[in-house]
């Protein structure tokens, strides 16, 4: 028996690795290709209007709140859980903010938008101080959302209950409470909202500008990227989703991490509700029914395994883009009805699940061969 | 610097219904590889778990470098410098090698992980083992051997003083095991104390300096490897004083079995093998014959049974039944051939815990009949009652959930399940483990009577006296390969133990 | 290892099924008692034209869809899976029935058969994904949950297809023995399910596979087949429920038929005693669970609580069920009581 330095037998592991170093990234590549394919098809089929900057910016604007929520859902799914309460929390937050802002019955007759944001703020600031300031309302709802998520996380962890069931209860609860706050949709005419915050934008060319909501999305996306790849918490989320038992044996704080994940999801759901109020200029307790499914679909299409441990925040962002592009394509087509969106999304989810299954099975086979 | 790295004295641990450790002592010196051996239920893993904080000991003291310690969690144990590498590599498959090594303690600056520092730290840990691995590779793309090395590197990354390796070579082949031993020796020379838990005799002799043997939760003894004969080791593990056993002949089974004419071969296994499970093995089982598979824990007995019953698929080799070549790729096929199997781990693979005794008993018959031809309730009760009486299953009623029965009675329920199907070959994997003496005797009597009626039986057991008592032919396994076979009068505990212990290099 | 023997320590124990059923039945009884004392008109029954009317009848009627769904969902949950698509399948079945009944001279049995066939096909789809391709049930049924309503709209061409055919309308609005016809359908379906699961070996196999799939595999049960059949059956039940739903409103509303009913069905089954992880199932418990949910909703309605707020008590019920099923919670309660005893 030779006492080698160990390189000969260990080297062939390296060979096999080269073939499969991309296995983790295959679903991500698939997602990216779908985005490109859809966009190129749109440009080809519907000409310059589809390819215009305005349409592109609108794509982000219309899906900003889905994007924020889906990014939070990504962390939950990465940790091996699921959050069904997303849509309900978005709706709840929107009506809460609307109720806070409108509760004191603002007289909106003399509101006019000012092209100059600073002047507008100065002109209307006395209104902003007379009732619950929207910033306060936003702050309160973000805190509430986070606490709600934390509560769900605690029940899931301490009582070892399936996330499916607990977040289902959360969904029912938040949905109902939204109606308790106010039974119908409520327009927000608060000047701070309309005049000031809405005037924050980055102007691009030809009268197109990037609205505040899209900037929010960008910030959330960057922060999420940082958390996922540059913090111990983010790495712990990946580890726990991949193999919770091993992660615990390795000393990771599984319980604390899981509760934090649901808190984060609650926060992003509430934030999505805030973005929603900017987008729709109203709050509606009956909105976003089935929204969590869209978020989950975006996450799955983005290449994240529903069993956890594998996936990317970037993938989810692309998944949201895909959902938006499909919607756009169908609208542009004009002849197809909107229900095709549902079918297309369902099929895409299926395709991506199939890809995931194939990649997992292939890697399992290779590992067994490598072990031998 | 004190020579004694670890001193455990009087360690006891009790679980509900079981005394897992009974005043066990264990000592480990710096720069020593110490083998920890014992059969199933000896307490090896419990002892280690009290050291690593998974369990809290009920009594006893643990001194690490002279200081008393009481770790309450794996993280605390790590902080003390005690690191463990488990049998199933407990790392995260989809993260990179470097990440796995640093997980939970990644170097950060203002909360931001510094990936370059992670790489550097990982490379330093790997090079301490004299290995060269690309640390940015995904862990699952590395072979199991490399994954174990990564686990060891992670253990070292925290400046471990004490390294525990729990059955590290179970999934490794010969070459990979040698690599591992090289690493272990290097670490020992660096002053680390290593606890090496294994059931491979050859390996423990090759690499350890001292051996501690546990049995039934008690310390049998600590020995210097060089001065402990293999045969003595085996006898201490099994609990038989070898020198005092006479080469007792085994009691011949009932007259009908031995005076029967040359028995027809029923099942013939030729060169059956599966990577990582069992080396090519030949077994012949005749009708009305009880063939025993003897060997220590981990020698490949259960693996052989699983291949025969279609749970695992062989890589090569053949199985012939009644002269016909067959391919058994699922338990259903095995059952159709007339095979039956009671697994070793009856709680996980045998009983359906929340179903009643009656339902568990008729399960296999019903599975055979399919979904639509259901047995009537009356018929089910009749079958269940007949077996409850015949096997003496102690249960308040046939509707009692099987999980509530004692181990012995659960085993009887499993036996009843298969007997109801009238199998031609009955594979019994440790049928008497964890069963009281009375039930044990009943089961052995049952096996004998089945054999006399013409059933072929493959009997797997770690209790040599059972194997010797009940079998007409014994196949001996060691370290996943067949090392011997005895028939009739040749069978004795002495002979079997000697075969297990015998090493090719020994005179 | 020395063993102390754990004898079967059950001095007094109810049969398993009774112990499980006590909770949902007691909860329902409590709710009904509350209504007896505090809600006017709750127990009032009228008879008009030989038909019963009243709050209780309403509960039976409105709850019939969830009851039908929960029969199929019971089997699926018992195998350790879940079917999120039943609501969408309801919409599809309703759409098929509505479209076909409007075709002149279409034989009525064919309409029903077609709607049921499509829903069985949906069940086959799910069964293949879960049973044969071994895809996680949540993921596999999510596909149809998302795409299903789109398919339903495809069938109706995006319209709210209405119909007036009296035979189809009768299914949702007629009366039999004084009770609304959907109740009869539920009763018949319950009987069929009970026979299917208890007179054949299907029930036994489902429980076995859900309780311990490995051991069932070793015993010769094909878990693949068993799971497949469970999903097909769930599809069938969803089809029935969808026909009833469409018949009830005389319209195929693909957006609202069955919306979130799959969640109600899962809740009903879990409340009724079947564990989310699988194993023993309790058909009667699922029916009681469905009734409990519907009673909750109707109670809220009778007390002038807005129907949209009704989900809140449902949420509380789920959490209670979770807590009751959690051993950690039992420990906390026990600790609380022992502290009280020693204090």
Image (cartoon, grey):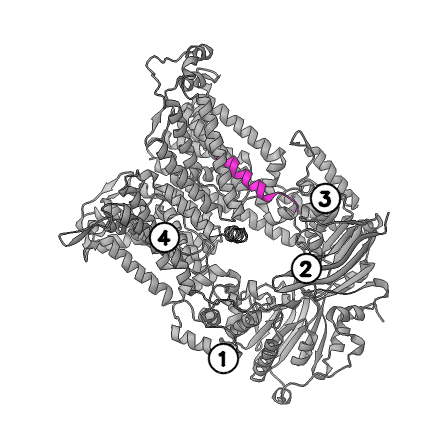
**Image location (x, y in percent) of residue C130:** 46, 53
Q: Which mark is residue B389?
A: 1
| 3D distance between C-alphas at marks 3 and 1 | 57 Å
Depth check, mark 1 against mark 2: the one in front is 2
B136 or C276: which is nearer to us? C276
| Circle 1 SS class | helix
Dividing the image into 4 quarters, which one contains the C terminus of chain B?
bottom right
Q: Which residues are magenta?
A: A250-266
Residue with the most extreme front position: C343
Q: Which mark is residue B13?
A: 2
How many labels, in total? 4
- The answer to whether mark 3 and mark 1 are in CB contact below 8 A is no
Q: Which residue is mark 3?
A: B79
Image-based side of A172 in relation to C178, left or right: right
| Circle 3 SS class | helix
**Image location (x, y in percent) of residue C134:** 49, 53
Name the image quarter holding residue A350. top left
Image-based side of A217 in relation to C261, left or right: right
Depth check, mark 2 against mark 3: the one in front is 2
Depth check, mark 3 against mark 4: the one in front is 4
């Amino acid at each position: 028996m030779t006492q080698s330095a160990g390189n000969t037998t260990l080297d062939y592991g390296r060979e096999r690795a080269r073939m499969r170093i991309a296995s983790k990234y295959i679903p991500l590549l698939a997602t990216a290709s779908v985005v490109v394919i859809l966009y190129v098809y749109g440009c080809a089929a519907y000409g310059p209007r589809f390819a215009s900057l305005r349409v592109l910016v609108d794509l982000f604007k219309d899906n900003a709140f889905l994007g924020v929520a889906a990014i939070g859902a990504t962390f939950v799914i990465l940790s091996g859980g699921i959050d069904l309460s997303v849509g309900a929390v978005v709706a709840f937050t929107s009506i809460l903010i609307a109720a806070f802002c409108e509760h004191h019955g603002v007289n909106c007759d003399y509101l006019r938008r000012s092209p100059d944001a600073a002047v507008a703020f100065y002109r209307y600031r006395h209104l902003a101080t007379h009732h619950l300031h929207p910033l306060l309302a936003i702050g309160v709802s973000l805190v509430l959302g986070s606490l709600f998520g934390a509560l769900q996380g605690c029940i899931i962890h301490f009582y070892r209950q399936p996330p499916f069931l607990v977040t289902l209860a959360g969904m029912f609860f938040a949905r109902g409470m939204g109606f308790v706050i106010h039974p119908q949709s409520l327009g927000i005419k608060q000047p701070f909202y309309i005049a000031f915050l809405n005037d924050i934008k980055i102007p691009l060319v030809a009268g197109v500008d990037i609205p505040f909501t899209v900037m929010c999305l960008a910030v959330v996306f960057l922060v999420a990227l940082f958390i996922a790849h540059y913090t111990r918490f983010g790495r712990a989320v990946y580890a726990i989703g991949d193999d919770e038992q091993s992660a615990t044996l390795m000393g990771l704080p599984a319980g604390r991490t899981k509760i934090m994940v649901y808190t984060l999801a609650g926060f992003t759901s509430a934030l999505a509700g805030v973005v929603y109020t900017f987008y729709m200029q109203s709050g509606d307790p009956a909105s976003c029914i089935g929204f969590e499914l869209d978020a989950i679909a975006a996450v799955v299409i983005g290449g994240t395994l529903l069993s956890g441990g594998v996936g990317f925040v970037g993938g989810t962002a692309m998944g949201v883009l895909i959902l938006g592009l499909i919607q756009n394509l169908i609208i542009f087509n004009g002849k197809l009805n909107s229900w095709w969106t549902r079918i297309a999304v369902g099929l895409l989810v299926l395709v991506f699940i199939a890809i995931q299954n194939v990649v997992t099975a292939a890697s399992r086979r290779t590992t067994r061969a490598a072990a031998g | 610097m004190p020579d004694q790295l670890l001193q455990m004295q009087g360690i006891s641990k009790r679980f509900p219904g079981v005394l897992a450790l009974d005043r066990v002592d264990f000592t480990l010196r710096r720069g020593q590889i110490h083998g920890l051996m014992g059969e199933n239920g000896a307490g090896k893993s419990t002892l280690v778990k009290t050291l690593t904080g998974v369990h809290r000991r009920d009594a006893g003291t643990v001194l690490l470098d002279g200081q008393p310690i009481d770790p309450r969690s794996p993280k605390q144990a790590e902080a003390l410098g005690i690191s463990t590498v488990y049998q199933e590599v407990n790392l995260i498959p989809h993260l990179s090698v470097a990440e796995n090594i640093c997980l939970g303690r990644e170097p950060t600056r203002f909360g931001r992980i510094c990936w370059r520092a992670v790489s550097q730290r990982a490379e330093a840990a790997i090079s301490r083992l004299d290995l060269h691995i690309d640390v940015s590779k995904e862990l699952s793309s590395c072979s199991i051997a490399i994954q174990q090395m990564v686990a060891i590197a992670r253990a070292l990354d925290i400046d471990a003083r004490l390294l525990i390796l729990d059955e590290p070579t179970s999934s490794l082949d010969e070459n990979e095991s040698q690599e591992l031993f090289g690493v272990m020796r290097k670490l020992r020379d660096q002053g680390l104390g290593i606890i090496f838990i294994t059931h491979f005799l050859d390996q423990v002799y090759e690499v350890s300096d001292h051996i501690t043997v546990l049995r039934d939760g008690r310390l049998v003894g600590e020995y210097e490897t060089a001065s402990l004969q293999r045969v003595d080791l085996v006898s201490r593990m099994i609990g038989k004083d070898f020198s005092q056993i006479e080469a007792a002949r085994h009691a011949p089974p009932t007259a009908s079995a031995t005076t029967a004419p040359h028995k027809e071969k029923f099942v013939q296994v030729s060169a059956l093998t599966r990577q990582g499970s069992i080396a090519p093995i030949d077994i012949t089982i005749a009708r009305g014959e009880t063939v025993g598979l003897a060997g220590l824990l981990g020698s490949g007995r259960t693996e052989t049974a699983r291949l025969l019953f279609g749970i695992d698929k062989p890589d090569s080799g053949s199985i012939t039944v009644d002269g016909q070549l067959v391919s058994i790729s699922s338990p259903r096929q095995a059952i159709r051939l007339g095979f039956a199997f009671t697994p070793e781990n009856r709680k996980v693979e045998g009983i359906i815990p929340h179903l009643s005794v009656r339902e568990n008993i008729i399960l296999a018959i019903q599975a055979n009949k399919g979904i639509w031809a259901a047995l009537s309730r009356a018929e089910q009760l009749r079958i269940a009652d007949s077996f409850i009486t015949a096997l003496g299953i102690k249960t308040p009623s046939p509707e009692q959930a099987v999980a509530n029965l004692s181990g012995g009675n659960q085993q009887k329920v499993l036996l009843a399940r298969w007997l109801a199907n009238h199998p031609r070959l009955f594979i019994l994997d440790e049928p008497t483990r964890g069963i009281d003496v009375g039930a044990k005797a009943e089961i052995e009597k049952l096996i004998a009577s089945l054999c006399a009626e013409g059933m072929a039986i493959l009997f797997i057991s770690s209790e040599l006296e059972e194997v010797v008592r009940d079998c007409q032919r014994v196949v001996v396994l060691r370290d996943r390969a067949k090392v011997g076979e005895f028939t009739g009068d040749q069978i004795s505990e002495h002979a079997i133990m000697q075969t297990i212990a015998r090493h090719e290099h020994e005179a | 290892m020395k063993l102390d023997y754990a004898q079967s320590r059950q001095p007094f124990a109810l049969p398993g099924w009774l112990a499980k059923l006590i909770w949902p039945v007691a909860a329902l009884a409590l709710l009904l008692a509350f209504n007896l004392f505090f809600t006017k008109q709750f127990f009032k029954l009228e008879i008009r034209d030989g038909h019963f009317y009243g709050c209780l009848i309403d509960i039976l009627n409105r709850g019939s869809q969830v009851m039908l769904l929960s029969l199929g969902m019971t089997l699926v949950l018992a195998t350790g899976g879940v079917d999120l698509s039943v609501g969408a399948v309801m919409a599809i079945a309703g759409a098929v029935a509505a479209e076909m009944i409007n075709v002149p001279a279409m034989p009525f049995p064919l309409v029903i058969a077609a709607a049921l066939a499509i829903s069985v096909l949906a069940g086959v789809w799910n069964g293949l994904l879960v049973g044969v391709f071994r895809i996680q049930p949540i993921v596999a049924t999510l596909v149809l949950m998302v795409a299903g309503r789109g398919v339903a709209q495809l069938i109706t061409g995006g319209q709210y297809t209405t119909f007036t055919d009296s035979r189809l309308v009768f299914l949702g609005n007629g009366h039999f023995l004084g009770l609304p016809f959907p109740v009869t359908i539920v009763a018949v379906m319950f009987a069929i399910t009970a026979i299917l699961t208890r007179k054949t070996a299907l029930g036994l196999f489902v429980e076995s596979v859900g309780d311990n799939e490995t051991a069932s595999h070793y015993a010769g049960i094909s878990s693949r087949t068993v799971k497949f059949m469970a999903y097909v059956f769930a599809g069938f039940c969803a089809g029935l429920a969808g026909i009833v739903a469409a018949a009830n409103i005389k319209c195929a509303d693909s957006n609202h038929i069955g919306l979130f009913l799959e969640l109600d069905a899962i809740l009903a089954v879990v409340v009724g005693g079947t564990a989310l992880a699988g194993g023993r199932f309790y058909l009667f418990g699922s029916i009681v669970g469905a009734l409990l949910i519907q009673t909750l909703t109707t109670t809220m309605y009778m007390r002038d609580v807005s129907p949209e707020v009704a989900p809140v008590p449902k949420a509380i019920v789920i959490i209670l069920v979770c807590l009751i099923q959690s051993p950690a919670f039992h420990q906390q309660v026990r600790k609380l009581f022992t502290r009280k005893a020693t204090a």
